[in-house]
Amino acid sequence: MSGYEAPLRGAGVEPVQVPVRSDRAHGVCIRMAVDAVGLMHSAPQVGVYVIVAADAALFPAVDMLRRRGRKVVGVWPVGRRW
């Protein structure tokens, strides 16, 4: 990820990488959900959210964003569906 971090930050994206078997993984999902909801309120002009995650812990946030008219694009490992 080191080769992508600077361009992502330059585009306003904060990359968060957590090892798959880490205890912090659930905390990162919570942080992403809180960030998405906060952005929805602080920047209502944002209409499309791209969420890259490895598990379904973000389903409630995805559902809430969609109910409020936001488009959500999910990127996840092969074999998983949102």
Image (spheres, rainbow, N blue to C red):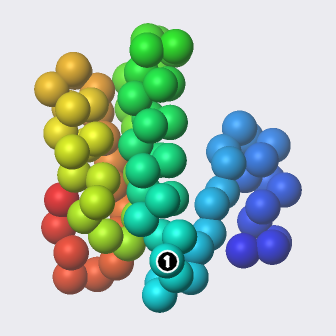
Picture quadrant of residue 72:
top left
Query: Which class describes the residues within 10 Å of circle 1: few (<14), some (14-19), or many (20+)?
Result: few
Q: Is residue 29 left or right of residue 66?
A: right
What residue is drawn where x is 62% and y is 69%?
A: 17
Report the side of 36 relative to 72 (left or right).
right
Outermost residue on the front side: it is: 23
Instruction: Please state if 64 lies on the left or on the right of 43 as rendered.
Output: left
Residue situated in front as seen by the camera: 45 or 68:
68
Quick check: 41 above or below 34?
Answer: above
Residue 52 visible in the picture: no
- Rendered image quadrant of residue 62: top left
Residue drawn where x is 25% and y is 64% of the image: 56
Identify the secondary structure beneath mark 1: loop
Question: Which quadrant does the N terminus fall into?
Answer: bottom right
The answer to whether residue 49 shows anywhere in this view is yes
- Nearest the viewer among 5 and 61 is 61
Q: Which residue is mark 1?
A: 23
For the point 42% across and 57% down, the residue is 29
Q: Which sits in the foreground, 71 or 67?
A: 67
**At label 1, which amino acid type do we have?**
Asp
Q: Residue 7 placed where, x, y %?
A: 79, 53
> Residue 82 at what x, y percent from top left?
18, 59
Estimate the x, y position of residue 35 in percent, counting from the top left.
Answer: 50, 36
